[in-house]
Amino acid sequence: MTVSPFPANEYGDDVHVIEHENQTILLVGTAHISKESVELVKTVIEQEQPDCVCLELDDKRHHALTQKKKWQSLDLKEIIRNKQLSTLLVSLLMASYQKRLGGQMGVSPGAELLAAAQTANEYHIPISLCDRDVRITLRRAWKSTSLFKKGYLLASLFASLFDKSDITEEKLTELKQKDVLAQLMDEMGETLPDLKRVLIDERDIFLVEKIKASPGKHIVAVVGAGHVEGMKKRFTSDNKNKIHDISQIPPISKGIKFFGWAVPLLIIGSIIIIGLRNGASAAGENALFWIVANGVPAACGALLAFAHPLTTIAAFASAPITSLTPVIGAGYVTAFIQVMTRPPMVKEFESAGDDVATFRGWWKNKLLRVFLVFLLTGLGSAIGTWIGGYEIFKNLIG
């Protein structure tokens, strides 16, 4: 395999030609919010007329880019049932940040990928969607990150929403340069190595293997600039055997499962022991304290989110029970009821990317209020678990 930049006088330094076995692959590195990238991919595809155009997209993201009524097919209740609400929230935060930067540049996020797809369709060129399912990527990233770093990541994402600093086309060009990009990836690897492995390294492997398997001998592949250097190195290796493993959502570790069941068993066991030792009334008092300690903070979280009254009642009723099982949390129960009682409208799904960047928008937008209910009732339940558990253990040993 050989890798070299395409002649600068034709396409510039963002296009690299890769000779792999019987394939010639033009790897186009883009910025997802750059007008220059939009024009570049259109030019390359029009002039090269390749056998196939490979895109850094999966089916879901391709559908979202090309379908105007993408929110019509989103089943929020099913997302909650599958415990994917946190994944959707992270995806929304990331998309909102890209959308804000894209707004400054006058181009929508992913416009160059959409332009590549449209240009390929115009010339009847087959399209190959080569990225891993975004839901798998986000869930693998979430599961691979420690609790502390999850908080750090969410805090960083929220902070980015309210960052009002401007970005220029010149800054985008700088970020696409090889040495600056490598530095950014190295910094990410130092602070969040597991996240970089899932978001960048694994997807480099996935993209390369899917491009290799795409039909045709002359291929144009459009990917984000952050993947180019890693992908170029991986064309020399055969990583087909890794695709299955990196396409799976890792199971919950035995340690977390043990801890998840150990805490409720300790709570229940402690109340039983207190009852055997001090009588049924003492056990009842501790059980009542557990209910109040869990129910009140969870209900307060619902009230802070301006949840529906039924959601607030459900928060109080469900928190003492969900805290005793790792199967489901109070946040998911209350989010589901909030969706049933105050379902978001399509226009609120469409405006969520803008509303998420304003403090008021979180309460005004019914979709974002579902997230608030999920987060605040879950936080309240967690606080109640620690308060209730501490009091019960104190009574047990006291």
Image (cartoon, rainbow, N blue to C red):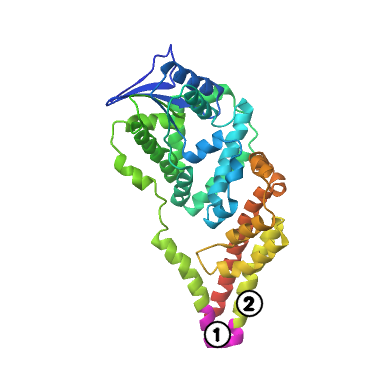
Q: Is residue 371 above or below residue 70?
A: below
> Is 276 included in the stretch rendered in magenta?
yes
Q: Which stretch did the figure color magenta?
A: 270-283
Q: CA distance from mark 2 to mark 1?
A: 13 Å
Q: Position of residue 321 (x, y in %)?
A: 57, 70
Q: In the rendered view, would you say 146 is above or below 348?
A: below
Residue assigned mark 2: 288
**Residue 173 magenta:** no
Q: Quadrant of residue 229?
A: top left
User: Is 305 displayed left or right of 26 in the figure?
Assistant: right
Instruction: Tell me the crowding category of disc 2: few under 14, some 14 to 19, or many 20 or more residues within 10 angstroms, Cα based.
Output: some
Q: Position of residue 24 (x, y in %)?
A: 33, 23
Location of mark 1 (residue): 275
> In percent of the image, x 59 and y 62: which residue is there?
330
Closer to the camera in the image, 41 or 264: 41
Dominant SS type (magenta): helix
Mark 1 neighbour density, 10 Å: few (under 14) some (14–19) many (20 or more): some
The reply to whether residue 297 is visible in this rendering is no
- Whether residue 4 appears in this view of the structure is yes
Q: Image check: 343 left or right of 132?
A: right
Q: Which residue is found at the position 54% from the left and 75% from the top?
A: 393
Does 305 sit above or below residue 108? Answer: below
